[in-house]
Every structure is written in structure tokens, then in C-alpha cells.
Image (cartoon, grey):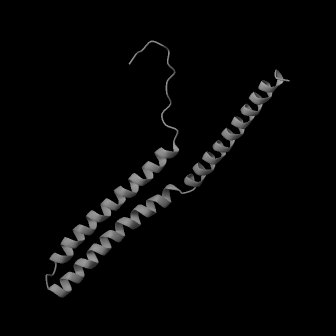
Amino acid sequence: MSSEQPDDLSDRIAKALEEREAKADAKRRKQASDDVSVSAGAYALRFGIEFVASVFVGGFLGFWIDKFAGTHPWGLLVMGMFGLAAGIRAVIRAYHELNARAQKLSPGPAKAPDDGTNDA
């Protein structure tokens, strides 16, 4: 009886490991398919909307400052530049967020097999 028990235990462990790996692979595929479902056009639209909205808000605030402070065209120019800078910053931030998500999902670079030559 004791001679059969380790084989049975090792078989159960191997089966449990295979099931665990299969579940993990299925979960990774589902997450990847969820992230892939967002097209490049959707990201481009997001970048464009964030940029245009920032420039518009900056320009609107500048126009409002000009109207009430009587500093026509300086408020619009200065706040328009701030809006432009904020728009560029928003696009860069969104790009870094997208890039970090892509790196998290990718398996990473393939590692070359070690042939024992220690070539660097």
C-alpha cells in the first residue's frame, strides 16, 4: 500500500498543477483579449479629445479674464499657452499609462538559452 501511495500523490499533484496552469493561462488570455478589444482608433480619439479639451478650457479662461480684466488679447494668449501645455501633458500621461499597461501584459523579451560560453 505504501508503494502505491507516493505514485498516487505525485499524480494528483501533477494533475492539480496542470489544472492551475490551465486556469492561469485562461485568465491571462481573457485579460489580454479585454485589453486588445480597445482599438488604436479609440486611443487616438482619447488623446485628441484630451488635447482639444485642455486647449479649449485654457482659451475660454483666457477669454473670460480678458473680458472682465480688460487685458484683451493677453489673457487669451497666456491661458491658451497654458491650455496647450496642459493638453500636451495630458497626452503624454495617457501615453505612459497605455505603455505601462502593454508592458504589464507582454511576457517580456525572450531569453537566449545559456550555452555555457559566457559570451557577454
Front one among 1 and 55: 1
Front one among 72 and 104: 104
In the current view of this chain or complex, which residue is farthest to the left?
A: 71
The image quadrant where one finds the C terminus is top left
The image quadrant where one finds the N terminus is top right
Residue 76 position, x and y percent, is 21, 76
Name the residue: 22% across, 77% down. 62
Name the residue: 40% across, 61% down. 47
Name the residue: 44% across, 53% down. 98
Residue 27 position, x and y percent, is 63, 48
From the viewer's perspective, is 11 left or right of 56?
right
Residue 53 position, x and y percent, is 36, 71
In the current view of this chain or complex, which residue is farthest to the front?
A: 2
Compared with 17, 23 (above or below) is below
Front one among 13 and 93: 13
The answer to which quarter of the image holds residue 2 is top right
Name the residue: 80% across, 28% down. 8
Front one among 55 and 107: 107
In the current view of this chain or complex, which residue is farthest to the bottom?
A: 68
From the viewer's perspective, is 51 left or right of 31?
left
From the viewer's perspective, is 6 left or right of 35?
right
Figure disc tally: 0
In the current view of this chain or complex, which residue is farthest to the top?
A: 117
Compared with 37, 8 (above or below) is above
From the viewer's perspective, is 11 left or right of 25?
right
Residue 46 position, x and y percent, is 44, 63
